[in-house]
Image (spheres, grey):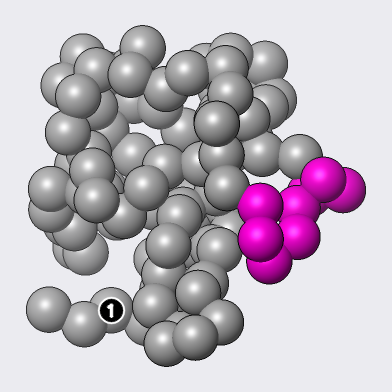
Amino acid sequence: MLHKIDKIRGFHILAADGEIGHVDEFLVDERDWSVRYLVVDTSNWIGGRSVLISREVVDAIDSPNRKIRAGGYRLFRSPGAQFRPWRWSPSWRPD
């Protein structure tokens, strides 16, 4: 199913054991314009960091309830996945 990324901004990300945060931005592949990562604001959970969530872990998008279900647990994100916009370049990939 296709979704406009404008509409998904602000959706809450839910892992198996609770909410992670909400979608703040997207990283898009320049070659084919596909979404590679969701930039998730975790300020309600771990103090304001933005982390990257791969599109590969998205299980379902619940548009009416503005929620995205992601596989794994809240702790599946490694500290290396922290998003630092000043460090990003087209060749950068999270650790």
**Residue 18 at x, y = what percent?**
27, 18
Residue that label 1 marks: 3
Q: Is residue 28 above or below residue 26?
A: below
Extreme residue in the bottom direction:
32
**Residue 28 at x, y = what percent?**
52, 72
Residue 46 inside the magenta-drawn segment: no
94 left or right of 57?
right
Mark 1 residue element:
loop
Q: Main secondary structure of the magenta part?
A: loop
Location of the C terminus by quadrant is: top right
**Residue 7 at x, y = what percent?**
41, 74
Highlighted magenta segment, given as a residue range: 85-92
Residue drawn at (17%, 33%), measured in percent from left and top?
A: 71
87 left or right of 23?
right
Location of the N terminus by quadrant is: bottom left
Residue drawn at (13%, 53%), measured in percent from left and top?
A: 60
Residue 35 falls in which quadrant of the image? bottom left
**Res. 6 in view:** no
Residue 41 falls in which quadrant of the image? top right
Extreme residue in the front direction:
91
